[in-house]
Amino acid sequence: MIPNCRSFAAACNAVAGTLCFLLLCVPTAGAQASRVGAALEGTVSDSSSARIPQAAITFRNTETNQSRVATTDGQGFFRADELAVGTYEVRLEHPGFAPGDCVYGVFGVQEYAVSDGSDVLKLDTALAPPTTYLGALGMTGLTAYFALLDVGKIRAGETVVISGAAGAVGSLAGQIAKLKGCRAIGIAGGQEKCSALVQKFGFDAAIDYKTENLRRALREHAPGGVDVYLDNVGGDVLDAVLTRLARGARVIICGAVSQYNADRVQGPANYLMLLVARASMTGMVIFDYQDRFPQATADLARWFRDGQIVSREHIVRGGVGDFPEALLKLFAGENTGKLILALDNG
Ligand SMILES: NC(=O)c1ccc[n+]([C@@H]2O[C@H](COP(=O)([O-])OP(=O)(O)OC[C@H]3O[C@@H](n4cnc5c(N)ncnc54)[C@H](OP(=O)(O)O)[C@@H]3O)[C@@H](O)[C@H]2O)c1
């Protein structure tokens, strides 16, 4: 019997949704082999039942240091030259990945993950640090991109209002709106965040929904009405923006942070303003756009490289056990930019 098998590719692990998770990961798989005739035959399997790709599998005798290499056949079956009886370190290497590579994938909140490589994306860390791939160049950037360009169909000269504007999706959305020649108005909680919206992310105006009268502020900053509203928060903020819609406005329901923990979800009381403005309100889910991620990611990467968008990450260090506490920061509004839990040992 051959002992456990470890593959040594380093990985970034991420979860979809509002909080992302970053770590270095060492996937493990179990290898079993039996001696048959003059050759060694066996199968490689792992606990998560990921398909084993055609991979090089190295057996290193820990006493003699001699190595033998076999190749799996895509089903996990391998055949190697005869090995002397002994203790072996078994190392499985995916042909598409090298030790030290950083990859992105949706694995859940855990320190280790096994993958056959089909559901992970190799990161170009020369372009941006790994954390950026959880922000501007990840699901966050893609959400802002498709929400505004595909659902909102923003056009140069239009007024775009964004709530949760200092958050991960919102801060990117404002920058994309500006890049496309729109007027961007952000809604966020607190003076510090509102200053950051204008000074760091290039919004034309920012409204502090905690201290300002939202309707009055919208009248001031969007005198011609709101052409596109990207809603990340729902509740009272959504209701206020509905009263200021321009004719033919598009309201994009991206999220509703203010409602996630409510016993009774507050619907939009002012929905009749959609009728008056001949407006539309559309929900969007980023996973519907998966087949277009490569093109969108290329656009985002180009904008990032050219300095047309910046990515801001709010990194909290801790362990897997700190995940719930980190998640709550979203509801307390403690983050500016993408909230990331980075593992201490990552
Ligand atoms: N549709 C999709 O496919 C998709 C994909 C990704 C994310 N989302 C959604 O998009 C939204 C934004 O996600 P994100 O990751 O960028 O989160 P985020 O905006 O970085 O964080 C949430 C922000 O919401 C604000 N907030 C919290 N409670 C609030 C309340 N009661 N009223 C108003 N604002 C409140 C806080 O900012 P302030 O300090 O400014 O209040 C907080 O920083 C979330 O609703 C998320 O679920 C949707």
Image: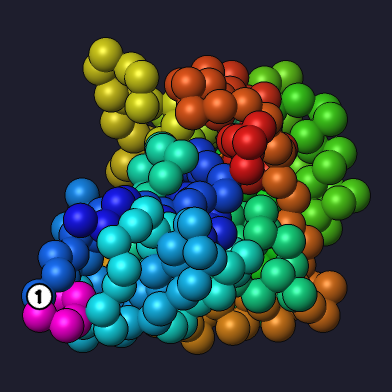
Residue under the image location 36 percent in, 74 percent down? 57
Q: Please, is residue 117 above or below residue 260 in the view? A: below
Dot 1: few (<14), some (14–19), or many (≥20) neighbours within 10 Å?
few
Q: Which residues are magenta?
A: 37-41
Residue under the image location 46 percent in, 74 percent down? 67
Q: Please, is residue 245 above or below residue 33 in the view? A: above
Residue under the image location 37 percent in, 26 percent down? 259
State the image quarter where residue 266 is shown.
top left
> Can residue 171 be seen in the rendering of this structure?
yes
State the image quarter where residue 75 is shown.
bottom left
The kind of residue on which mark 1 rests is Val
Q: Residue furthest top?
A: 263
Is residue 213 one of those drawn in magenta?
no
Along the line of sight, the residue nearer the viewer: 241 or 282: 282
Q: Badge 1 is on which residue? A: 36
Q: Residue furthest right?
A: 199
> Can residue 74 be seen in the rendering of this structure?
no
